[in-house]
Amino acid sequence: MIELDHNATTRPAPEVVEAVRRALEETWHNPSSVHRGGQAARHGVELARKSVAELIGAKPREITFTSCGTESIDLAIRGVLGAAGPGRTLITTRVEHAAVREIARELEAQGLTRWAPLGEGGVVDVAGLGAMLDERVRLVSVQWANNETGAIQPVREIAALCRERGVVFHCDATQRVGKLPVSVLGEGGAEAWCDLMSFSAHKFHGPKGVGVLWARGGVRLRPVLLGTQELGRRGGTENVAGIIGAGVAAELAGAWLKEERSRRELGMVRDRFETLVLGRVRDAVVNRPRGGERLWNTSNIAFPGLEAEALLLLLSERGVNASAGAACSSGSLEPSPVLLAMGIPERLAHGSVRFSLSRESTPAEVEYAAEIVGECVEKLRESSGSLGV
Ligand code: PLP
């Protein structure tokens, strides 16, 4: 199978699998127990916290482990707004992952969400967002990199504006951590540039079931799951084996990120994939921010006249895994709301497929996949009699 669906998830690294297996066998006690077994589990969790903190230049005590990126985001948004008291407003964007978008829609029904304006390619209009900051706004939440197109948002500029106005800034860094360097610290190790950052271990070759929320010291958060664990920020016995695996994944990701060349080369492999696909399918269009930056691993391509789901099924039969829209919305025939919010016309959004690489991807498999994509598009068009648009 050729995996080109790595924004949905990544294969746990062998070192991670081994660490999780050993933890399940050897450090399976409850880390809150005072006996030796419990203390060994606690030690494993705390070492992992240190490794995860190092990956983003943070202090270990500012890291909270949760069950997934979605829960980290939930804690960040509900936690900050809950601590701020009633009537405080969230600003976010329509291109966020559903984990943010759905909370924002729930809050919108209470009049507590405002949507930031987007420029071309779904990139936030920073000045427009700045004009929306008033005394009712408590929190701004913007993703660092988009899970469908890889578009990178100007989060540092947005965070700086928020800081000036005393508004808390949360960055959903789930797609960036492990793919590009991330530091919560300002230039030269200066004070943190944002207030909260969420991400998820399974996006960088760690296990599923481990989310991370970093919160700058001093940020007030009302816990969502009440309990004594994680310094009272998140109740519930920790997923010890998963967290230990996440720690190993963070160390491996940190080491991989030191070599800029690896990701530059993989970016060239992604570009070659797009050139090959566009060469075979003349009317295909790459959905990307014009002139803007995007992740090295993501390619979102529209095939006019096709239904993405039909193409995904055929690709899967031919041994290529890809996805349409966010992974959680595959299976629905609705076009991706993110692509629509980016201004992609509905007829293109319907036929848009996301191909995403990981640090394991090879030029040979990606080039071969491009060939298969071309053949599958041709076959579907022949069978539907569609000439494309
Ligand atoms: N945010 C972004 C940008 C994502 O891509 C994802 C997952 O795809 C999430 C949040 C949610 O993470 P998780 O799957 O760990 O809940």
Image (cartoon, grey):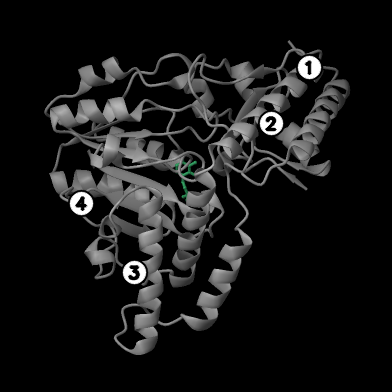
Q: Earlier in the sequence, mark 4 or mark 2?
A: 4
The relative height of residue 256 versus residue 312 in the rendered view (above or below) is: below
Q: Earlier in the sequence, mark 4 or mark 3?
A: 4
Label 2: which residue? 269
Q: Quadrant of residue 50?
A: bottom left
Tell me the element at label 3: loop
Residue lying at the far top of the rendered structure: 389
Q: What distance separates the C-alpha of mark 4 from that of mark 1?
A: 51 Å
- What mark, if any, has residue 236 been given in the picture? 3
Q: In the rendered image, is residue 242 in sight? A: yes
- For the point 48% across and 32% down, the residue is 146
Q: Earlier in the sequence, mark 4 or mark 1?
A: 4
Q: Earlier in the sequence, mark 3 or mark 2?
A: 3
- Measuring from the top left, give residue 276's x and y in whole percent: 77, 23
Q: Quadrant of residue 84?
A: top left
Tell me the element at label 2: helix
Q: What distance separates the C-alpha of mark 2 from that of mark 1?
A: 15 Å
Q: Nearer the viewer, mark 3 or mark 2?
A: 2
- What mark, if any, has residue 64 been given in the picture? none
